[in-house]
Amino acid sequence: MGVEALFPAMLEHIEKKQCTLAISKTKSPSAGFSEKEKWLGWLQKGAEGSSRRSSLKTCIQEKGSDSMKHSYSFSNFQTTELAKVAIATDTDVVITKLGTSETINGVELLKYVKKTAPHAFRIMYSHTASESAETRQYCSSVANMVSSDESAIAKAISQVFYCVDKSQVGIYSCPWCDASGMTEDQVWIHGPLYHINASNDRHALMKTDCPICNHVQPIMQTHIHKHHGPWARKTMLSEVQRESSNMLYAFGLVVVRHPNGKYLLVQERFDKGYWLPGGGVDKGELLTTAAIRETKEEGGVDIRLTGILQFQFSPQRNATRLRVIFLGEPIDPQQKPKSVPDYESVGAVYATSEEILGKNFYPSKLKFRSGEPQHWVNYLEKGCSVQPLDALLEGDEV
């Protein structure tokens, strides 16, 4: 599907918004692509009170393009040229393909934009990166979002437009980039959307004050998420309930195996690497329900549980941890994994056993939060036993 397919899904979010959008197709003319596929579409931010409107048609006219088809322009810019224009026009979103040309390279473009325009939301629109755990990991070092899902990109851009909406008068700045003039709720959304993959280096953040309450917070993302915005106003009930003080903490993790043999990996926040989908059980929730919910929240995939791999019971001094490792499969094998970053995760990807375990005595190139994904993939690839799901009785069954 061509990059131009993004526009129908985005138009409803783009029109009537005061934002800037730059989209680059990173194939060189010599690659044999049609002129239609070598384009740069712009959405120019209009100054408050200006007669200029933020519409694609207006932007094309301002850029002097002769092509009006689909209401976006067709041009072919070098990487540095695009980046410089992006800075000059205060671009809010940059979308690029991965690219294969040495002179027009999506990763190099986003690397430049990350350095010179940290306020811009950077999207790598690539089927290759979306379907390869290694390539996704590589692109995530410069991209805020890696995706080939047009609806997911439209959703992310809608959130970006909310964050940069200056009609909401705000006084707060982002502690990671140069974004400013945000409300509390804009900061609450902006943080994980833009920076959830930023390394949670305690030493680097030790002197950082929360922009909202001015308290020094070594784990800024967690602090803002749980002490400000909708969560602090008790509007996100499941997470409020999860914070309740319990002596027994229960968790459900899932090894999701696709019918094609690949396994679902979640790209964890704070640049921790890949891990299995899963998390804590909410108050009054079943273990199986929690495992399915967490897989959807972190991995973006609706699953059915098919078996149990292990029960884990860990008594500790102040609390006790119960974990159940489930085996699952996607309900719809065609459903794409999550790609819009948020507080739960950076995104997710299906990976082959070779990507996860390595090949021909060479270790995996993937970064993992822990060795659990490799342990369980190796376990299943060896054909080890899986316990039936009815070994766990829950709720009214007990």
Image (tube, grey):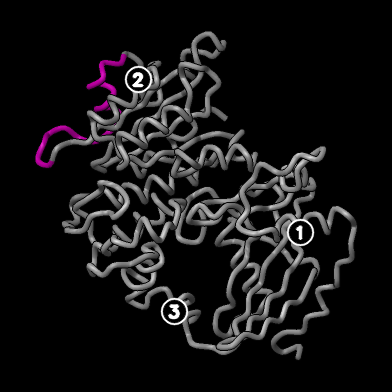
Query: Which x, y percent locates residue 129?
Result: 59, 36
In the rendered view, would you say 393 is above or below 305?
Answer: below
Q: Which residues are magenta?
A: 48-65
Q: Look at discs 3 and 2 and give the one toward the viewer.
A: 3
The residue where tag 3 is placed is 240
Q: CA distance from mark 1 to mark 2?
A: 54 Å
The residue where tag 1 is placed is 375
- Of residue 251 and residue 151, the one placed in the foreground of this image is 251
> Which quadrant would the C terminus be assigned to in this image?
bottom right
Tell me which corner region of the image, top left, top right, bottom left or bottom right, holds residue 47.
top left
Q: Look at discs 3 and 1 and give the one toward the viewer.
A: 1
Identified at 21% across, 58% down, the residue is: 172
Q: Which of the two discs, 3 and 1, labels the residue nearer the N terminus?
A: 3
Identified at 52% across, 37% down, the residue is: 139
Q: Please, what is the three-letter code of the amino acid marked with disc 3? A: Val
Q: Which of the two discs, 1 and 2, labels the residue nearer the N terminus?
A: 2
Tell me which corner region of the image, top left, top right, bottom left or bottom right, holds residue 113.
top left
Identified at 67% across, 80% down, the residue is: 322
The residue where tag 2 is placed is 68
Q: CA distance from mark 3 to mark 2?
A: 50 Å
Q: CA distance from mark 3 to mark 1?
A: 33 Å
> Which quadrant would the N terminus be assigned to in this image?
top right
Q: Residues within 10 Å of mark 1 (few under 14, many from 20)?
A: few
Q: Please, what is the three-letter code of the amino acid marked with disc 2? A: Met
**Badge 2 element:** loop
Which label was assigned to residue 334? none
